[in-house]
C-alpha cells in the first residue's frame, strides 16, 4: 500500500489544466471583493455597512443554488457546470458599468455569486476526483493554491485598475480573466473515465459513511440527501466560524488601511496570499505525517494572532504582520477541513458534499463581512477587527468537541486502534 502511494501521479495533465483555469476564475472574483465597496462609495454610498451587504448578496447568490449545482455535477458533468458558472461570472462583469447605482451593484454581484457557486463547486469536486486517494490531503492543498494565487493577484490588480485607470478598466480586466479561465477549462477531459471508475467506488466508503454520518435517513433520492451531504456537517460547523473572519478581512481590510492613511494597502492581499502559498506547500505532507489535529490547532491560533494585531494597525508594517499570521493560519485550517470533509464523504456524493461545504463557507463569508460592517459603524475599525477573534475561539471549541472525536473514531477503525495521525 505504501509503495503504491509513492507511484500514484498527482500532477496529471487534467489537474494542471484545472489548477490554471481556476487561478483565472478566482482572479475574476477576488478582484471585485475590495473594489466594489470603494466603487459604491465613489457613486455616493456613505454607510460603511454597504460594503458588507455587497459581500452578503454575493454570498447569498452563491449559497442558494450550490446544492443544485452540486447535484448537477454528480448527475451530469463537472466540467459543464464549471464552464457555465465561469461564463455567468464573465458576462456579468461589464454590467457594473452599465447600471451605476447601489441597487445595480447588488443585483449584478448577486448574479456573479450564482456563477461562482457553480464554478467553485465543480472545480473543487473535480480536484477531489483527480488527485489519488492516498495523496488527497496533499492534492487538495495544492488545488487550494489556485485560490491563493487568485487572491494574491486579484484584489491588488483590482485596486490598481480602479484607482489608477478607473472603473471600466476594472470591469474589463474581470472579463479578460474570465475568458482566460473559460479557454483553459475547455481542454479538461476526464468525465468518461470518472463515470467508469465511479461504479466501484461506493463500497470502499461504507465504513466512512457509518462512522461519519451514522445512519442516513431515507433513500438517497430524498429531498434531504439531494440538498446536503450529512457526513460533512460536523466539518461545516467548524468551518462556519473559521471563515467568518476571513470574509470580514477580504471585505474591509482595504477600507481600514485607507482610513488609517496607509499607502499600498493592496499589498495586504499579496502578503496574505504569499503566506497561504508557502504554508500550503507543506501542510498536506505535515498532516499526513502528524495528523490533522496537531497541525490545525496551531493554524487556528495563528489566525487569532492575525486578528488581534489589527487592533494596533496604525502603519503598513502592522498590517503586513497581520497578513502573515492570518495567512499562515488560514492556509492550514481551510484545506485541512476541506480534505477532512472529503475523507468522510462517499465518492458518488462529492458534488453534493462540495456544495454543502462551500455553501457553509459562502454563508460564513457574508455573515463575517456584515457583522464587521456593523461593528465598524458602532465600535470603529480596530475594536471590530480584534473582536473577530471570538469566532476563532468558537471554531476551536467545536473542532475539539465534535470533529476531533469523529476523526479519532474513523482513524481508529482504519488502523485497528492506531490513532496517532488525528
Image: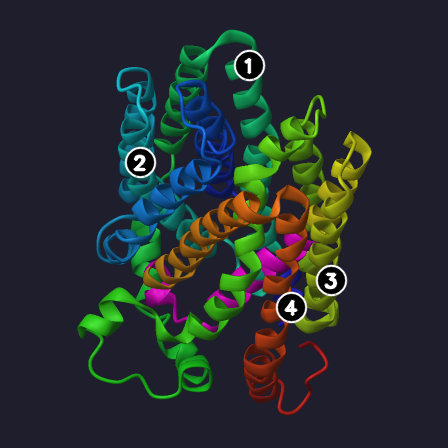
Q: What stretch is highlighted in magenta?
A: 329-351
The secondary structure that most of the magenta stretch takes on is helix
Task: Determine whether the residue tagged by mark 1 lies in a helix, strand or loop.
Answer: helix
**Magenta span includes 344:** yes
**Where's the C terminus, which quadrant?**
bottom right
**Near-viewer residue (259 or 213):** 259
**Which residue appears at 71% of the width and 41% of the height?**
323
Q: Foreground mark, 2 or 3? A: 3
**Near-viewer residue (339 or 207):** 339
Q: Which of marks 3 and 1 is nearer the N terminus?
A: 1
Q: Which of marks 2 and 4 is nearer the N terminus?
A: 2
Does residue 146 appear in this view? no
Crowd around label 1: few <14 · some 14–19 · many ≥20 (10 Å): some
Task: Determine whether the residue tagged by mark 3 lies in a helix, strand or loop.
Answer: helix
Q: Are marks 1 and 4 in contact (CB under 8 Å)?
A: no
On screen, residue 250 versus residue 188, left or right, reads: right
Q: Foreground mark, 3 or 1? A: 1
Residue annotated with mark 1: 163
Residue annotated with mark 2: 83
Residue annotated with mark 4: 393
Q: Foreground mark, 2 or 4? A: 4
Residue annotated with mark 3: 301
| Mark 2 to mark 3 CA distance (whole Å) | 37 Å
Amino acid at each position: 500500500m505504501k509503495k503504491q502511494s509513492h507511484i500514484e501521479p498527482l500532477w496529471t495533465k487534467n489537474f494542471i489544466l484545472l489548477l490554471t483555469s481556476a487561478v483565472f476564475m478566482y482572479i475574476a472574483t477576488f478582484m471585485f471583493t475590495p473594489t466594489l465597496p470603494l466603487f459604491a462609495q465613489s457613486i455616493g454610498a456613505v454607510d460603511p455597512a454597504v460594503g458588507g451587504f455587497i459581500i452578503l448578496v454575493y454570498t447569498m447568490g452563491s449559497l442558494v443554488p450550490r446544492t443544485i449545482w452540486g447535484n448537477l455535477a454528480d448527475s451530469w458533468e463537472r466540467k459543464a457546470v464549471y464552464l457555465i458558472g465561469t461564463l455567468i461570472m464573465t458576462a456579468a462583469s461589464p454590467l457594473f458599468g452599465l447600471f451605476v447605482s447601489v441597487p445595480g451593484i447588488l443585483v449584478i454581484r448577486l448574479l456573479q455569486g450564482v456563477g461562482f457557486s457553480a464554478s467553485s463547486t465543480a472545480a473543487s469536486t473535480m480536484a477531489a476526483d483527480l488527485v489519488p486517494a492516498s495523496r488527497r490531503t496533499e492534492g487538495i492543498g495544492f488545488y487550494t493554491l489556485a485560490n491563493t494565487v487568485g487572491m494574491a493577484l486579484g484584489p491588488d490588480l483590482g485596486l490598481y485598475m480602479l484607482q489608477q485607470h478607473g472603473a471600466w478598466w476594472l470591469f474589463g480586466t474581470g472579463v479578460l480573466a474570465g475568458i482566460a479561465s473559460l479557454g483553459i477549462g475547455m481542454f479538461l477531459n476526464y468525465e468518461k473515465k470518472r463515470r467508469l471508475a465511479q461504479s466501484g467506488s461506493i463500497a470502499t466508503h461504507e465504513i466512512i459513511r457509518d462512522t461519519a454520518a451514522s445512519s442516513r435517513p431515507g433513500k438517497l433520492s430524498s429531498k434531504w440527501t439531494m440538498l446536503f451531504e450529512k457526513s460533512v456537517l460536523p466539518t461545516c460547523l467548524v468551518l462556519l466560524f473559521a471563515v467568518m473572519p476571513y470574509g470580514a478581512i477580504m471585505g474591509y481590510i482595504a477600507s481600514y488601511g485607507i482610513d488609517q492613511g496607509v499607502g499600498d494597502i493592496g499589498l495586504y492581499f499579496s502578503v496574505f496570499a504569499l503566506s497561504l502559498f508557502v504554508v500550503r506547500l507543506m501542510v498536506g505532507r505535515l498532516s499526513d505525517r502528524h495528523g490533522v489535529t496537531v497541525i490545525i490547532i496551531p493554524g487556528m491560533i495563528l489566525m487569532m494572532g492575525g486578528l488581534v494585531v489589527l487592533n494596533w494597525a496604525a502603519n503598513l508594517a502592522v498590517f503586513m504582520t497581520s497578513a502573515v499570521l492570518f495567512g499562515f493560519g488560514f492556509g492550514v485550517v481551510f484545506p485541512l477541513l476541506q480534505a477532512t470533509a472529503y475523507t468522510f464523504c462517499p465518492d458518488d456524493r462529492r458534488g453534493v458534499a462540495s456544495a454543502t461545504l462551500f455553501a457553509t463557507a459562502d454563508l460564513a463569508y457574508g455573515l463575517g463581512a456584515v457583522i464587521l460592517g456593523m461593528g465598524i459603524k458602532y465600535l470603529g475599525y480596530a475594536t471590530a477587527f480584534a473582536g473577530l477573534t471570538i469566532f476563532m475561539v468558537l471554531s476551536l471549541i467545536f473542532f475539539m468537541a465534535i470533529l476531533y472525536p469523529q476523526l479519532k473514531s474513523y482513524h481508529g477503525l482504519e488502523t485497528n486502534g492506531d490513532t496517532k495521525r488525528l
